[in-house]
Image (spheres, rainbow, N blue to C red):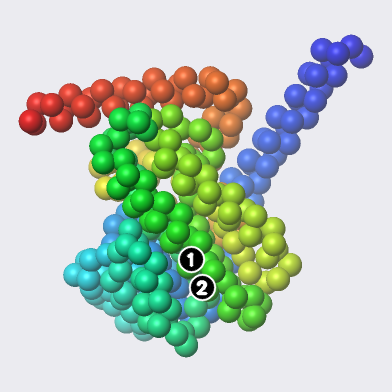
Amino acid sequence: MGFLGVTGAFALVYVTARFASFLYRLLCPVKLNIRKFGEWALVTGCTDGIGRAYAIELAKRGMSVILISRTKEKLEQVAKEIHSKNANVQTKTIAVDFTKDNSIYSTIREEIRGLDIGVLVNNVGMSYDYPEFFDKVEDSAKLVNNMIRCNVDSVAYLTQMILPDMLQKHRGLIVNLSSVSGRRPVPLLGLYSGTKGFVDLFSRSLAAECASRGVLIQSLCPGFVVSKLSGIRKPSLFSPTPEQFASSAIDRISLPFTTGYWAHDLQDFGQSLLPEFLSNKVTMYVLGGVRARALKKRNRAQ
């Protein structure tokens, strides 16, 4: 067998293995009873989008929920909605801003002291207002500070806070919200992609560390979901509602990595087969168009 034949054989094996892994994540996740991990779930960024839907779905499945986000009034609205549908679960709200300094974690630690936290969902996050070249982002110093604190520090500090107790009890689940944007380079969303890349690798590294110690760690990497963060307002085949996504994702908590939703699995698998240079060109073309429309709209408003 010549060089081309050997190369072709290896390529076939590689694609087959990737396809088998994709099919397993898509069709064969083991569904687990979420309540076995503990009494309470802690969800950050829970007043909108995936975080809100995740908190409501966890309560629906019998867990009491600690709701953490920036705005007290919105937290109370979510808590009220949970109680109206699930009279037997408890809620606790903690209003903190994850773009502020690290003193917020002392506040959180005191508020959750003594609670049996079995599930941690690190969902809080922020992105760009619109796709932009990194050197042209307005007030870039503020963006860098806020995005790293919100997207990176929150995941690391809350995991550091809660994981030791889970390991001591030999049970627990930590779901860290990354993104398909953290799976590969995303030009024009470079800082966002980089922060979500940290979340993905950090989570999968911890998953390997904790695999035999009773605690599940999951890197959850969704595609587009209807939310304020994505800017998508109408659901479609590849953009589910937050409720559809949360229900699907919780059924996949046994997987150390998942997009959480079957259509996003298809997207991620297809894009993973593209060479990086080609993926970058496609992304630049698509997001470049989004950038141009955003700037045009902004100029008209001025």
| Of 229 and 29, the residue lying toward us | 229
Is residue 290 visible in the rendered image? The answer is yes
Q: Residue at x 81, y 22 (%)?
A: 9
Which residue is denoted by mark 1 in the rendering? 157
Q: Quadrant of residue 167?
A: bottom right
- Residue positioned most to the bottom: 114
Q: Nearer the viewer, residue 83 or 134?
A: 134
* Crowding at mark 1 (Cα within 10 Å: few <14, some 14-19, many 20+): few
Residue 187 in percent (x, y) is at 43, 29
Looking at this view, is 86 or 129 the one in front?
129
Q: Position of residue 226 (x, y in %)?
A: 32, 45
Which of the labelled discs sits on residue 161, or is there none?
2
Up the image or down, 114 lies above or below 118; here it is below
Q: Position of residue 277 (x, y in %)?
A: 55, 21
Which label sits on residue 261?
A: none
Side of 282 where 207 appears, left or right: right
Label 2: how many Cα within 10 Å (few below 14, some 14–19, many 20+): some
Q: Residue at x 7, y 30 (%)?
A: 302
Disc 2 vs disc 1: Cβ atoms closer than 8 Å?
yes
Residue 43 falls left or right of residue 210: left
Residue 141 is left or right of residue 113, and the answer is left
Residue 262 appears anywhere in the view: no
Task: Indicate whether 125 appears above or below 81.
Answer: above
Report the quarter where the N terminus lies: top right
Query: Considering depth in this image, is 280 or 110 the residue closer to the camera?
Result: 110
The image shows residue 127 at horizontal and vertical percentages of 34, 44
Q: Amino acid at mark 2?
A: Met
At 53% across and 35% down in the image, what residue appears?
A: 184
